[in-house]
Amino acid sequence: MESDLTDLRIPAVLLTAAALAVSLPACAKDIIVHMKNQGADGAMVFEPSYVKAAPGDTIRFQPSDASHNAETMANMLPAGATPMKGAMNKEAVLTVGKPGLYGIKCMPHYSMGMVALVQVGKVTPADIAAAKAVKLPPFAAKRMTAALAKVK
Ligand SMILES: [Cu+2]
């Protein structure tokens, strides 16, 4: 009798573990973006400068070269999303929750066009129009326009 009870308990534990695994986000990813002095698209770049992520993913902006940081743009951030401001020469970690478009800039090289775009989940035509309407310095605008063209 006692051994029957033990046999019943083990499957119950396994079922609970399986149920927990299913309830967690499918497979939250870590996405690496390099901060570089020189990249395929010229000087002072985030590489890649366009990232497609899903809610729950983490984007890691890594200081591959010195004198960069990564921070969210206040004027290109989904409503309710938490702003992020990375320190100079440190990895900046952005875990995304809200779907939408997240503009990223490197403070010292913003005017040199060091910007990136993170798309999280599905975005609406209104989201894209709002991002396109944001005024940026000319070099930043050029790269952001190219990044926005990749949104789908
Ligand atoms: Cu920079």
Image (spheres, rainbow, N blue to C red):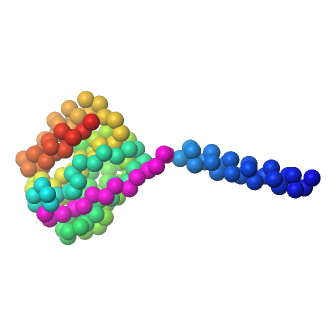
Q: How many marks?
A: 0
Q: Nearer the viewer, residue 12 or 57?
A: 12
Query: Compared with residue 121, is residue 17 higher up or lower down, i.e. above or below?
Result: below
Q: Nearer the viewer, residue 78 or 61?
A: 61
The residue lying at 39 percent from left, 50 percent from top is: 57
Image quadrant occupied by the C terminus: top left
Query: Compared with residue 48, is residue 91 higher up or lower down, i.e. above or below?
Result: below
The residue lying at 10 percent from left, 60 percent from top is: 43
User: Residue 107: percent from the left, percent from the top?
Assistant: 18, 58
User: Residue 134's quadrant in the figure?
Assistant: top left
Q: Is residue 126 magenta?
A: no
Give the overall secondary structure of the magenta segment.
strand
Q: Is residue 33 magenta?
A: yes
- Position of 7 with respect to 52 (left or right) is right
The residue lying at 13 percent from left, 63 percent from top is: 38
Q: Nearer the viewer, residue 144 or 69?
A: 144
| Residue 78 appearing in the image | no
Extreme-right residue of the structure: 1
User: Residue 2: percent from the left, percent from the top?
Assistant: 90, 55
Extreme-left residue of the structure: 138
Magenta stretch bounds = 25-38
The residue lying at 87 percent from left, 56 percent from top is: 3
